[in-house]
C-alpha cells in the first residue's frame, strides 16, 4: 500500500504542477487584459455619471430635508389649531349646557398676583364688571379657567390662552403681568372684540390664524389663533391662544444643508418671515413676488410657493446658481424654502475625476510590475514544488497508513454508552490531532450527558417554584368579583397578566370606610422576581398608609416614597396612580406618581383621556412632593386606570398600541359594566400583538359609579 501511495502522489503531483503552471500563466495574462480594460471603462463611466449622481444625491437630500421640516412645522401649527378648536368646542358646550358645569369664581388680578399663573378677568372700557349679567356669564365660562391655566403651564411655547365674548369680557389663563396696570396703578381695560384673532374667527365662522405680530403681553413674535363659540347656533364669542414662533424658526434653520446652505419661510404674499441670511435677496423682510423686475425666476418660484406648490429648481440667487427646494406649510399658507449652491455639487465631481485619472495611471503601472514579478515567482515555485513533492511522497506514504488504520479501529469500537477512547501513539501530525480530538470529544460528550441531567433537574425545580410564586402573587391581588356585592352604588373590575411567570405590576382596591373606596394601580421597574418582591412591598405600604389617613393621596404617596427609598440599593422605582372615591357623591381626589393618564367615563358612556399633572416616581428621590387633583363623576360615569403595558404593547412591525387605539376600544361598545370594557381592551391588545410576544405586564382597573 505504501508503494501505491507513493506512485499515485508522484503522478498526481507532476500533473498538478504542469497544469497549475499553464493555468497561472494564462490567468495572469487574462488578468492583465481585464484590469486594463476595466480601468479604462471605469474612468469613462465615472466621468459620464458622477456629475449626475452627485447632483441627484444632493438634490434628493435637499428636497427630503425641506419636505420633512415643512411637514413638522405644519404638524406643530395644526396641533396648535386643534388645541384652540378643542377649547372652543368645550366653551360652546358650557354655553349650551350651563347646568352641567355650575358656576366658578373668577377674580380681577391684584398687583400682589404679578408673576402668578392664574385665571384672569379682563373687560372692555364700556363694561361694568359689577353687572349681574356680566358676572353670571363670567362665572359660567369660569369653569374653564383650570383648563386655560393647565394649557399655559404644560406648553412653554404657548402664549396666554383666552375666551373673549360679545359682551366685551375676557377670561385669560396665564401669567399676571405688570402691564395689566397703567402708570397710575389703574387696571387696564382690554376689549377682546377688537383683537385680530377675535374679528377673524367671527368673520370666517371657523378656525382662524392671524398674521405674525408681537404678543400683546410679552412683545415676542407670535401667531394667534381663534375659533368661534356658539350658543344655539348664535355667535357668542371666540376662544383663542398665541403661539411663540421660536420653534418654527428652529425648524427653518434645520432645513439648511451644509455650511453654505440657507433657508427661509415666506407667507402667502411672498414676504420673507424668517431667514438664515442677513442680507441679499433672501433676507428677512424682503418680498420675493414684488422683486419680479430684479429676479424674475425667483419671483415665479415664490408665486408657486405662495399657491401651496412644492418642487425643486435651479436658478440664480444673488448672482450665483443655487438649487432651490420649496414645500408648503399648508395650515397657515406659508412655504419653507431651502437653497444650496450648485458649486457644492460640481466641485466634488471635478476633484473626483482628477483623482480617478491619477489612480488609473498608477494602477496600470503597478499591474505591469506585478505580472512580471508573478511570472518569475511562479516558475521558481514550480521547480521547488517538484523536488519537494518527490521527497515528501516517500515519507508520507510510510508514516500515514499505520496511524490511520489504528484510528479507524478505535473509532469503530465507539457505540452506545461506551465512549472510552485512548490514543497512545505520538505521530506529530494531523492523524494524531484527529485522534486527540476524538478523545477530547468523547470526554466532553460524557460530561455533557451529566450536565444535561443536572440542568434538566434544576429547570424542573425552578419551574415548580415559579408556579408557586405566580399563584402567591395572584392570591395577593383582589380576584373575587364583584368584591362588594352588597354595594350597588358602584361596580369595579380589575385584571393583571404578567409578561413573565411573576410580574412587577399591581392593582388594589379596598373600602377605607362605608363611604370611601381606595383604588390604585402601580408599575414597578424591571420584570420577574425582583419586580414582584418590590411590588409586594409597595402594595403593603400603600394600603397601610391609606388606612391610617386617606384625606390626601399626595401625602400618602409622599410617605410611601420615603419608606421605599430606605435601603433601595438596587435602584428600583415604581409609578403609582392612587384615587379615593367618595361613594355617596362620586367625588374623586387623586394623585399621580409618574403613572399613565387616567381615562374618564362621562355620563353618556364615552371615555376621554385626562392629562393630569404627574409627580416623580416612587423610590426615585427621597422627600419628593406630589399634588392632589379632583374631579366629579357623573351618574353612570367612572374611570379606567392601566399600566404602560397597554399603550406600549408592540406588534411584529415594532408599532406601539398607543392611547388612541385604547380609547377606540373603550368606546367601541356599551360601558355600563367595567368587566365588559376591560375584556374589550384586552382582546383588542391581543389582536394588535398579532403573534408578537408580550413584552410588559398588562394591568387594568375599571370603576363605574351608579350614584
Image (tube, rainbow, N blue to C red):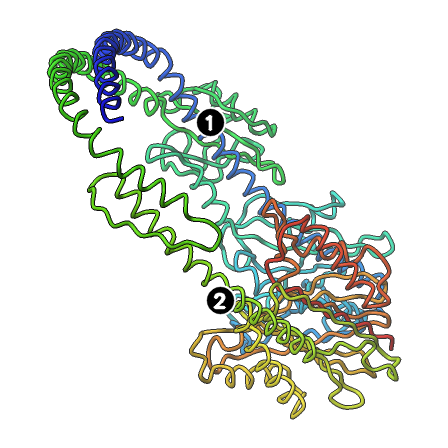
Q: Residue at x 58, y 68 (%)?
A: 460
Name the mark nearer the viewer: 2 or 1. 2
Place of residue 183 in the rendered image (x, y in percent of width and height, measured from the top left)? 50, 69
Percent of width and height locating residue 609: 70, 62
**Residue 21 vs residue 234: left or right?**
left
Dot 2: within a 10 Å radius of its alpha carbon, few (fewer than 14), some, or many (20 or more) residues?
A: few
Circle 1 crowding by C-alpha within 10 Å: few under 14, some 14–19, many from 20? some
Rendered image: mark on residue 60: 1
Q: Is residue 28 visible?
A: yes
Q: Nearer the viewer, residue 362 or 466?
A: 466
Dot 2 lies on which element? helix
Q: Front-most of 606 and 179?
A: 606
What is the number of callouts on the image? 2
Whether residue 607 is situated above or below residue 200 in the rendered picture: below
**Residue plotted at (49% across, 20% down):** 292
For disc 2, the marked residue is 454
Between 319 and 336, the residue placed more toward the observer is: 336
Residue 148 visible somewhere in the drawing: no
Provide residue 232's location: percent of width, then percent of height: 87, 55
Instruction: Check the image and report above or below for 48 versus 239.
Output: above
Residue located at (27% from left, 20% from top) = 352
Question: Is disc 1 placed on a helix, strand or loop?
Answer: helix
In primary-sequence order, the first of circles 2 and 1 is 1
Image position, residue 431 (x, y; %): 27, 39
Amino acid at each position: 500500500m505504501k508503494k501505491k501511495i507513493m506512485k499515485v502522489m508522484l503522478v498526481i503531483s507532476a500533473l498538478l504542477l504542469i497544469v497549475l503552471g499553464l493555468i497561472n500563466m494564462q490567468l495572469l495574462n487574462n488578468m492583465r487584459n481585464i484590469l486594463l480594460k476595466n480601468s479604462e471603462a471605469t474612468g469613462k463611466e465615472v466621468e459620464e455619471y458622477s456629475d449626475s449622481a452627485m447632483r441627484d444625491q444632493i438634490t434628493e437630500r435637499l428636497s427630503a430635508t425641506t419636505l420633512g421640516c415643512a411637514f413638522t412645522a405644519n404638524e406643530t401649527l395644526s396641533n396648535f389649531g386643534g388645541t384652540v378648536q378643542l377649547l372652543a368646542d368645550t366653551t360652546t358646550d358650557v354655553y349650551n349646557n350651563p347646568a352641567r358645569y355650575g358656576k366658578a369664581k373668577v377674580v380681577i388680578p391684584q398687583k400682589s398676583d404679578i408673576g402668578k399663573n392664574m385665571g384672569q378677568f379682563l373687560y372692555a372700557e364700556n363694561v361694568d364688571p359689577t353687572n349681574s349679567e356680566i358676572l353670571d356669564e363670567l362665572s359660567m365660562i369660569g369653569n374653564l379657567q383650570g383648563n386655560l391655566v393647565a394649557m399655559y403651564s404644560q406648553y412653554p411655547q404657548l402664549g396666554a390662552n383666552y375666551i373673549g365674548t360679545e359682551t366685551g369680557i375676557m377670561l385669560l389663563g396665564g401669567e399676571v403681568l405688570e402691564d395689566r396696570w397703567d402708570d397710575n396703578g389703574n387696571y387696564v381695560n382690554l376689549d377682546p372684540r377688537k383683537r385680530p384673532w377675535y374679528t377673524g374667527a367671527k368673520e370666517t365662522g371657523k378656525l382662524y390664524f392671524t398674521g405674525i405680530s408681537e404678543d400683546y403681553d410679552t412683545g415676542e413674535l407670535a401667531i394667534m389663533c381663534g375659533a368661534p363659540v356658539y350658543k344655539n347656533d348664535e355667535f357668542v364669542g371666540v376662544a383663542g391662544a398665541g403661539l411663540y414662533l421660536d420653534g418654527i424658526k428652529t425648524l427653518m434653520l434645520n432645513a439648511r444643508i451644509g455650511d453654505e446652505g440657507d433657508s427661509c419661510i415666506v407667507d402667502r404674499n411672498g414676504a420673507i418671515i424668517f431667514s438664515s441670511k442677513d442680507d441679499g435677496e433672501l433676507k428677512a423682510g424682503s418680498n420675493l413676488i414684488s422683486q419680479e423686475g430684479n429676479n424674475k425666476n425667483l419671483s415665479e418660484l415664490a408665486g408657486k410657493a405662495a399657491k401651496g406648490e412644492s418642487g425643486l429648481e435651479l436658478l440664480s440667487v444673488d448672482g450665483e446658481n443655487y438649487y432651490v427646494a420649496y414645500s408648503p406649510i399648508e395650515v397657515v399658507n406659508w412655504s419653507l424654502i431651502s437653497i444650496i449652491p450648485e458649486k457644492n455639487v460640481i466641485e466634488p465631481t471635478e476633484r473626483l475625476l482628477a483623482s480617478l485619472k491619477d489612480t488609473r495611471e498608477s494602477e496600470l503601472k503597478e499591474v505591469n510590475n506585478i505580472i512580471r514579478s508573478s511570472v518569475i515567482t511562479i516558475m521558481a515555485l514550480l521547480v521547488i514544488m517538484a523536488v519537494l513533492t518527490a521527497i515528501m511522497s516517500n515519507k508520507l506514504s510510510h508514516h500515514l497508513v499505520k496511524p490511520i488504520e489504528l484510528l479507524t479501529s478505535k473509532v469503530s469500537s465507539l457505540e452506545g454508552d461506551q465512549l472510552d477512547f485512548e490514543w497512545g501513539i505520538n505521530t506529530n501530525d494531523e492523524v494524531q490531532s484527529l485522534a486527540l480530538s476524538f478523545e477530547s470529544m468523547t470526554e466532553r460528550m460524557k460530561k455533557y450527558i451529566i450536565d444535561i441531567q443536572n440542568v434538566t433537574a434544576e429547570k424542573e425545580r425552578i419551574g415548580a417554584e415559579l408556579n408557586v410564586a405566580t399563584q402567591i402573587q395572584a392570591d395577593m391581588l383582589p380576584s373575587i368579583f364583584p368584591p362588594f356585592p352588597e354595594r350597588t352604588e358602584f361596580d369595579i373590575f380589575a385584571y393583571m397578566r404578567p409578561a413573565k411567570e411573576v410580574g412587577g405590576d399591581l392593582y388594589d382596591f379596598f373600602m377605607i370606610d362605608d363611604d370611601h373606596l381606595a383604588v390604585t394601580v402601580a408599575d414597578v421597574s424591571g420584570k420577574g422576581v425582583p419586580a414582584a418582591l418590590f411590588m409586594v412591598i409597595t402594595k403593603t405600604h400603600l394600603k397601610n398608609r391609606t388606612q391610617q389617613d386617606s384625606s390626601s393621596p399626595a401625602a400618602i404617596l409622599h410617605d410611601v416614597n420615603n419608606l421605599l427609598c430606605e435601603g433601595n440599593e438596587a435602584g428600583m422605582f415604581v409609578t403609582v396612580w392612587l384615587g379615593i372615591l367618595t361613594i355617596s357623591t362620586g367625588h374623586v381626589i387623586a394623585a399621580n406618581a409618574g403613572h399613565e393618564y387616567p381615562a374618564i367615563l362621562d355620563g353618556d358612556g364615552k371615555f376621554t383621556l385626562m392629562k393630569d399633572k404627574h409627580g416623580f416616581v416612587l423610590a426615585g428621590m427621597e422627600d419628593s412632593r406630589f399634588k392632589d387633583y379632583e374631579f366629579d363623576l357623573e351618574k353612570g360615569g367612572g374611570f379606567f386606570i392601566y399600566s404602560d403595558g397597554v399603550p406600549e404593547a408592540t406588534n411584529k412591525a415594532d408599532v406601539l398600541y398607543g392611547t388612541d387605539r385604547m380609547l377606540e376600544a373603550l368606546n367601541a361598545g356599551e360601558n355600563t359594566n367595567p368587566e365588559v370594557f376591560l375584556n374589550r381592551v384586552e382582546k383588542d391588545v391581543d389582536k394588535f400583538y398579532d403573534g408578537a410576544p408580550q413584552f410588559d405586564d398588562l394591568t387594568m382597573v375599571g370603576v363605574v359609579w351608579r350614584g
